[in-house]
Amino acid sequence: MISDPRVGATCNFEKKGPVVNAKGILKSAETVLVIDWPSKEVPELLARAGLNAVVRGGPGPEDYSSYEVKSGEIVVRRTGCPPKRADLIYSYRPLSELPGIIATAKELGAKTIWYQSGVTATGGKDPKGCWVAEEELTLARNLVEAAGLHFITKPYIGHAAQKIRVAG
């Protein structure tokens, strides 16, 4: 077992790769760059958890917004630029885009990529779905870990965010 006190992560090295403490990763993060999302619930729950949630909402270089909680309400503010740094990258993009997402993570100093597929184990579409075929999961995990980053696919990030601090 390896413990990483910087992110509160514990990794058990097994045949399928390390198991990362997702809640610990979120608790230790300050800024999350959200690259696409299945619903606005994702950045809203991250903001309500006290995180600086910055969203890349399109392919353009200025397609960035910040989600914040003010007086109990979610406020979306267009920033027009990526954050200067991020602790975590959340991605709801095809795995074929993973090399670019890894490059963005390294550029921003992120230590973790949290990937969500939007697919259930039966192959159905679900905005909270986190299933990935074993072969694809292994390839993706190997690519991310070769870059020196943590890789999370479960649980749905919204559920994990609901379990940590609540912003007011």
Image (cartoon, rainbow, N blue to C red):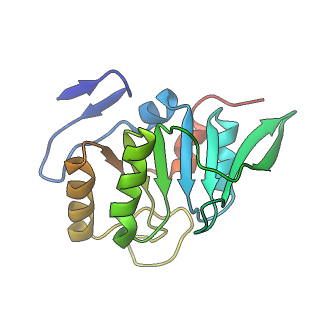
User: Against 103, is 52 above or below?
Assistant: above
Q: Residue at x 23, y 48 (%)?
A: 145
Q: Is residue 116 above or below residue 14?
A: below
As drawn, which residue projects farthest toward the right?
Answer: 71
Looking at the image, which residue sits at the far top?
Answer: 5
Viewport quadrant of the N terminus:
top left
Residue at 56% from the left image edge and 31% from the top image edge = 30
Q: Nearer the viewer, residue 141 or 23?
A: 141
Q: Quadrant of the C terminus?
A: top right
**Relative vertical location of residue 127 with respect to residue 1 in this rendering, above or below:** below
Number of callouts: 0
Residue 65: percent from left, percent from top:
70, 52
Percent x, y for residue 35? 54, 58
Q: Quadrant of residue 120?
A: bottom left
Q: Please give the name of the residue rendered at 21% of the width and 64% of the height, measured from the top-left corner.
A: 139
Q: Can see residue 154?
A: no
Foreground of the two, 87 or 151: 87
- Residue lying farthest to the left in this orientation: 15
Q: Position of residue 123 (x, y in %)?
A: 41, 78
Q: Position of residue 136 (x, y in %)?
A: 26, 69
* Quadrant hosting residue 83: top right
| Side (left or right) of 164 relative to 112 | right
The residue that appears at 39% across and 68% down in the rendered structure is 97
The answer to whether residue 108 is left or right of residue 61 is left
* Left or right side of 159 for 14: left
Q: Nearer the viewer, residue 86 or 2?
A: 86
